[in-house]
Amino acid sequence: MRAKNLDLLIVMAFVLVNVLWIQLPDRPLAVGIVLALPLALFFPGYALTQMLFRKHASGQASRFSSKLTFQPDQQTDRPITRIDQLLLSFGLSMAIDVMVGFGLNLVSIGLGGLSWIISLGLITAIFTILTFFLRQRDAPATSTDTEPLRLRVTVQDSVLFVMAALIVTASVWISIIRPLQPQPSFTQFWMLQANQANKSCAVSIGVQSFETNAQTYYIVMTTNNTQKRVWSSIMLQPQQKWTQEVPAVPDANNNLYIEAQLYKDNTAGTEYRTVHLTLHVLGAGGGSQQQCTIGS
């Protein structure tokens, strides 16, 4: 009886190892595959099978055999065999994988190694814990003692509980509490036609900082290789945006090749970003205003 929850202990240990393994940097791929395959293809279904078909246990099996002795015609409640358990474990695991995949695809976390491990680990841990408590509840039915029920906690039960607590804690910490990993700092730089619907010849130029601290920028814009505008000392805080609309008036009905270079104060005169845009001049629109379309 002391080893009746040994299988649950092994399942929880495997789940815990997967949760801890996914946190390690520079993980060997082969080891990750070896650890993840049982979690994806066997353990969730095994835990669910043990929860739904607990009557295969030895105590329940002996009670069933005595029932067959007196009621041989009632055989619909027969315990499942080891082969049944194996097939159900694989089949239910694949069904769980499909449902988890659909669920992850609908949420922002998406389909990734971390999300798969956490989702399957939590589901397996929940089924395992429920199986443990259901086995504890069913245990008195197989006992012939008339003594009142007393709570007995074995070493294996304690280890199983600690592993379950660790898995739940790690899952909550990874998905909710853990601070976001720092992302590489960068700066966005763009140039678009200011009003494409009205075929405007003006352009909209913009900068947005995703740096970790305040940055000073310097922008040079040229039209047909002739310097047009210069913006210096553009100070932006993290997440701050700067935009400017610049009219591009052609001298004749020809193409406008507009280019802009972005410099950072820490790049010592080396351009950080370059954007360019070609506008085809169509001629005069409503009134005397010329119209342009984006070209290549």
Image (tube, helix red, strand yellow):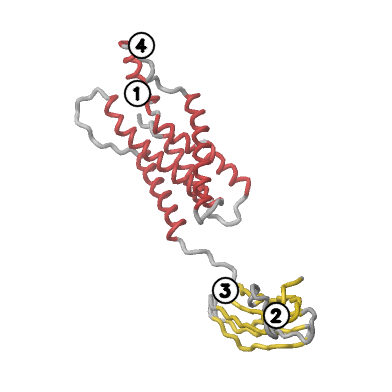
Sooner in the amino-acid sequence: mark 4 or mark 3: 4
Q: Amino acid at mark 2?
A: Gly
User: What numbered label is drawn on residue 210?
Assistant: 3
- For marks 2 and 4, the one nearer the N-term is 4
Residue pictured at 61% horizontal, 75% vertical: 187
The x, y position of residue 288, in whole percent, is: 70, 86
Q: Is residue 17 left or right of residue 129?
A: right
- Spatial CA distance of label 1 from label 2 is 88 Å
Q: Quadrant of residue 159?
A: top left
Where 170 falls versus 153 (above or below)?
below
Tag 4: amino acid = Asp
Q: Which mark is residue 60?
A: 1
Of mark 4 and mark 1, the one earlier in the sequence is: 1
Note whether 51 is above or below 81 in the view shown. below
Q: CA separation, marks 4 and 3?
A: 74 Å
Q: Amino acid at mark 3?
A: Phe
Q: CA distance from mark 2 to mark 4?
A: 93 Å
- Front residue (pair 30, 233): 233
- Binning the other alpha carbons within 10 Å of mark 3 as few (below 14), some (14 to 19) or many (20 upward) gives many
- Residue 59 placement, left or right of 217: left
Disc 2 is placed on an element classified as: loop
Q: Which residue is mark 2?
A: 285
Q: Nearer the viewer, mark 3 or mark 1?
A: 3
Identify which amino acid the numbered label 1 is placed on: Gln
- Residue 1, by quadrant, is top left
Q: Residue at x 75, y 77 (%)?
A: 282
Report crowding for label 1: few under 14, some 14 to 19, many 20 or more residues within 10 A (C-alpha): some
2 and 3 marks in contact (CB < 8 Å) = no
Residue at the front extreme of this rendering: 287
